[in-house]
Every structure is written in C-alpha cells, then in structure tokens.
Amino acid sequence: MNPFDLTGRLAVVTGARRGIGRAMARALAEAGADVIGVSANLEPSGSDVEKDVTAAGRAFEAIRTDFADPDAVHALAENLAARARPIDILVNNAGTIRRTPAAQHSDADWNLVLQVNLTAQFGLARALGATMVERGYGKIIFTASLLSYQGGITVPGYTAAKHAVAGLTKALANEWAPHGVNVNAIAPGYIATDNTQALQDDPQRNAAILARIPAGRWGNPGDLAGATVFLASDAAAYIHGTILPVDGGWLGR
C-alpha cells in the first residue's frame, strides 16, 4: 500500500481560493482526497481551485466564509463538525497580513490579524479536532511562517499570530496524539504570492531576501505540495507537534 495515498479522504482547506491554499488543495486532490475549499471570496462555482480539484478527478465543494467574522467562523465550524461524512484532514491556511511600523500599528489591524490568523484557526481546529478525537483518526495542518521563529519587520500582529500558531500546534498535538490525531504545521519561506507582493516589488528588500535564501529564488505555492500531502498522509503517522519549514534553506543560513 502507498502510505501517501489519500483516496477516500475528505479534506477542508481554508484560504483555498489562491496562492498557497490553492496549491495545497490541488496537491491533496492529486493524492486522492476530495476537497472542501473555504475562503472569504471563493466563487460558488467555477473557481480556479475547483477546476484544479475536479481535473484531478475528485469532488469539490465551495464554502464562502469571512474569517474576520467570529460568528461566521463559528457557523462554519458547526457545519463541518456536524456532517455525516467526517472531515479527515483540516488544512488551517487562511490568513492575512498588515504591514505597519509597530508604533503606528493600529488596534484594528492587530485585532483583524489575530482573529483571522489565530482565533479562527483555533475555532476550526477545536470543533473538527473533537470529532477526530472521537473517531480516533485525523490530520490537522496549520500554516505557520518563518515569523513563527523570527520577528520580521513592520508586521507585529502577524508575527505574534504566527508564533502563537506554532505554540498552538504543539499544544494540540500534546493532547490529541494519544487519540490518533496528528497536529503539525508547515512554515513556508518567502513564497511569491499576493501577500508578499510588496516585498517582491521593493528592490532593496527583494535583493536582501534573495541573498539569504540558499536555493537562490523565491518559493512558489507548488513548493508546499509535497509537505502538505506528507503531513496529511499515513506516512506521517508518527509525526506530532512539528513545524516543518519549506523555505529554500532560509532558517539554516
């Protein structure tokens, strides 16, 4: 048997409309999983991620949820946890970022980033994790960051949230590993997406970033595919509470 085969599994991927989330959804589908894609602006039908998943021969369902709205996140969690077909894999990837020097970083930006990147993630993990513990099986994958390890520049809310995501990954793993539930995280490096466009467009920051990456290039969303499938599969059955960097060697520099 192929331990990386996800045939018959059902995965929820948040932030699935574009970028890293879309690549993760596509990778899971290509490994055999059906996918529920969730995003704030996800089209009800005909989205790019839906086309990716169905092209792989798997079923896709779109759910539009604004992760900045606590009530909407609560409703989503209740919906998913109550389904007759249980969720096997939760990829907690939805996120946002606000770039402002710390002395000018507003309460509104801080609260938004913490809600989307941390509080909403915990709410979904809590609801679906409970069903996984009851079944004795499940995979939860958070999207952490290099800023789960480092401080960054002009992103205090994002850094605080991503440090917390790393800690939450370990805390949930400690509780749920004995019940057959794997909780891990992927820490993407500098990936060329909309969230990093400002850095790509800044000649000085772009050059400084590239100079530190041993691989010599920005990552692309597809670089997260292998790590996603691995952590979602039975090949990672004995991996718990790990934050796996996919960073072109950045942290080793």
Image: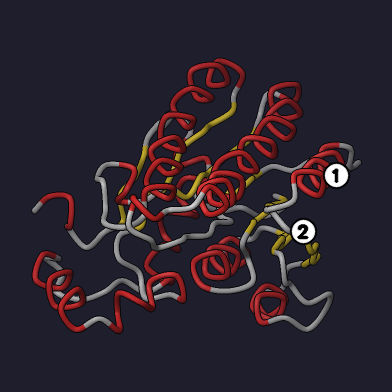
Find residue 202 and report its horizontal and vertical position in percent. 25, 81
Residue at 72% over, 72% down = 41
* Amino acid type at mark 1: Ala
Q: Secondary structure at mark 2?
A: loop
Label ID, residue 186: none
Neighbourhood count class around disc 2 (C-alpha, 10 Å): few under 14, some 14–19, many 20 upward: some
Asked if the residue under mark 1 is in contact with the one under mark 2, i.e. CB atoms within 8 Å, the reply is yes
Q: Which residue is tagged 2?
A: 65
Q: CA distance from mark 2 to mark 1?
A: 9 Å
Rendered image quadrant of residue 34: bottom right
Find residue 105 and report its horizontal and vertical position in percent. 42, 53
Q: Which residue is tagged 1?
A: 75
Colour scheme shown: secondary structure
Between discs 2 and 1, the one toward the N terminus: 2
Q: Is residue 69 left or right of residue 3?
A: right
Q: Is residue 31 left or right of residue 20?
A: right
Find residue 17 and report its horizontal and vertical position in percent. 64, 71
Out of 18 and 147, give the one closest to the viewer: 147
Residue at 74% over, 51% down = 69
* Amino acid type at mark 2: Thr
Residue at 9% over, 71% down = 211
Neighbourhood count class around disc 1 (C-alpha, 10 Å): few under 14, some 14–19, many 20 upward: few
Reply above or below: 62 against 33.
below
Reply above or below: 82 against 202.
above
Whether residue 79 is visible, yes or no, is yes
Instruction: Point out the image quarter for the C terminus.
Output: bottom left
Whether residue 3 is visible, yes or no, is no
